[in-house]
Amino acid sequence: MIKRVVCVSCPVGCEVAVDIADGQVRRIAGNRCPRGEAYARQEAVEPMRVVATSLKVVGGERPLVSVRTDRPVPRRLIPEIMGAVRRLAVEAPVEIGQVLAEDLAGTGARLVATRSVRREGTTGTTAGDPRRQFGERGPAP
Ligand code: SF4
């Protein structure tokens, strides 16, 4: 079976053909450099993605905080990760870069805030007690 993958490692966008037989990569063609081979091999066997989404904030100046995983995760696990994120609520304040959940769906990936959210009705620093970062539903499973 030939899988065709567009390499996104640089703007050239090579179309790479990955020949797979019995679950094994037999041959890779069309890449112009080794990065493309590595990307196409991963993409054909186990596609990985960074997940970017929003998380509920309790008591914040805004109801949501933007978050992303700190590393790519298997694409097949994204529905499970999104389900865990939907069940999660974090208490304000939230600091940019703050880790809001660990080991999402057993991937080792952490969920990190990509912006800060102050407590409602406050100004100045958003730094808070990390023990209070999780809402009443607790950390992601
Ligand atoms: S194979 Fe190499 S040259 Fe082609 S898109 Fe990927 S990184 Fe760029």
Image (cartoon, rainbow, N blue to C red):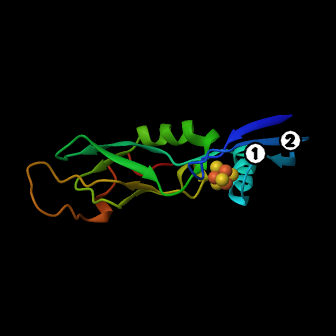
Secondary structure category for the residue under label 2: strand
Mark number displayed over residue 20? 2
Q: Does the residue tagged 2 have its C-beta within 8 Å of any atom of ligand 1?
A: no
- Give the number of the mark in front: 2 or 1: 2
Mark 2 to mark 1 CA distance (whole Å): 9 Å
- Residue visible at 75% across and 45% down in the picture: 45
Disc 1 marks a residue whose amino acid type is Val
**Residue 2 place in picture, x, y as percent:** 83, 35
| Residue 134 placement (x, y as % from top left) | 34, 53
CB under 8 Å between discs 2 and 1: yes
Residue 65: image x %, image y %? Answer: 30, 46
Circle 1 crowding by C-alpha within 10 Å: few under 14, some 14–19, many from 20 = some
The kind of residue on which mark 2 rests is Ile
Mark 2 Cα-neighbour bin, 10 Å: few <14, some 14–19, many ≥20? some
Q: Find residue 23 and report its horizontal and vertical position in percent.
A: 86, 43
Location of residue 86 with respect to 70 vertically, above or below: above
Count of labels shown? 2
